[in-house]
Structures are given as C-alpha cells and as structure tokens.
Amino acid sequence: MSNSVSRTAAVILGSAALAAGAVLPAVAADHGHGHGHGAPAPHSTVTLGAVQYDSPGRDDRSNRSLNAEWVTVKNTGKRAVNLNGYTLAKDSRHVYHFKNVRLAAKQSLRVHTGVGRNTSRDLYQGSRFYIWDNDDTATLRDNHNHVVASKHWAPKHHR
C-alpha cells in the first residue's frame, strides 16, 4: 500500500512542478516584452542627443522661435534604422509620430517644435506652442512602444 501511495504522491508532485513551470515562464515572458508599459526595449542604437528647450531670444511664439526649440535623435549604430512608428513625447498630449523616416548610420536629426518642411536632418512637429520646458523629460519609444531613450533636463539648482 505504501508503494502505491508513494507513486501517487510522486505523480501529484510531478504534475504540480510541471504546472508551476508552465506558469512561471509565461509571467516572465510577459515582463520581458513590456507591451508598452515603460519596459526598456532591447538594446537600441537610437538615442537622444542635445536638446534646445529654451529657444534663444524672445519667446514670441513666432514659427522661427518655435523651431529654435528642438530635440536631437541620434543613430549611434553602423546600420540605418527605420523610425516609422517611433514616437517622441513629453507627455500624452505632446507626442510626435515618426512617419517615413530612415535615420542613416552614425547620423542624427532634429525634431523641431514648430512648422516646417521635413528633410532627412530636420523634422517638424507642427505645434503653434512651445513644448519643452526648462524642467522636462523627452521620451523616445520604438514602434512596439518600448522606451528606447529618455532624457531629463532641469536648471542646475533643481537637480
């Protein structure tokens, strides 16, 4: 009788171990993908560079002044990167969507706040208002909504 009890216990414990093993990888896989909830993306060669958040001169909301405010996106890799579907955001109300943009290897481009004609080196958000404040954060997400890069700046006395 004890032999059949031992076998039954072994079967139950083995089944429990298999069930637990099946559940754990699913949870770990879910965290690994992030599904757009702020999880970092797999290593990316695309990053944020220099930021001009306070356009020089008077803040008169002219298109010239708005376009003097910009964020640099850099490709540090050896291959071009397709930025279609990427976003650059301050928050949920200020989001720039990259469309038909390919960033060459070792190149950078500027995303300006105002209105303009897009080129391979300059893109325009089309805003009539300033976006980047003196104490702010820019977040770049890939086409899977993973955070690729984030950059925060603030006056020295606030850090």
Image (cartoon, grey):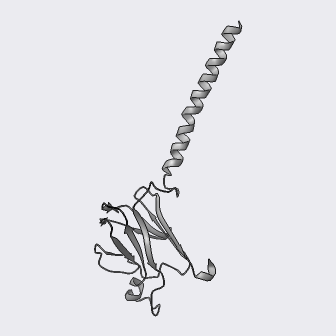
Is 34 placed above or below 132 here? Answer: above
Q: Nearer the viewer, residue 49 or 52?
A: 49
Q: Position of residue 145 (x, y in %)?
A: 45, 58
Q: Position of residue 154 (x, y in %)?
A: 56, 78
Q: Quadrant of the N terminus?
A: top right
Give the farthest residue toward the bottom. Answer: 58
Give the farthest residue toward the top. Answer: 1
- Judged left or right of residue 159, residue 39 is left
Is 31 placed above or below 62 here? Answer: above
Residue at the (62%, 26%) spot, across then down: 16
Q: Position of residue 2 (x, y in %)?
A: 71, 9
Q: Position of residue 126 (x, y in %)?
A: 38, 77
Residue at the (45%, 77%) spot, across then down: 51
Q: Quadrant of residue 15?
A: top right
Q: Quadrant of residue 157?
A: bottom right
Q: Quadrant of the C terminus?
A: bottom right
- Judged left or right of residue 150, residue 79 is left
Residue at the (48%, 85%) spot, across then down: 54
Residue at the (46%, 57%) spot, across then down: 146
- Count every numbered label the image shows and give the total: 0
Is 11 placed above or below 107 here? Answer: above
Q: Nearer the viewer, residue 55 or 3?
A: 3
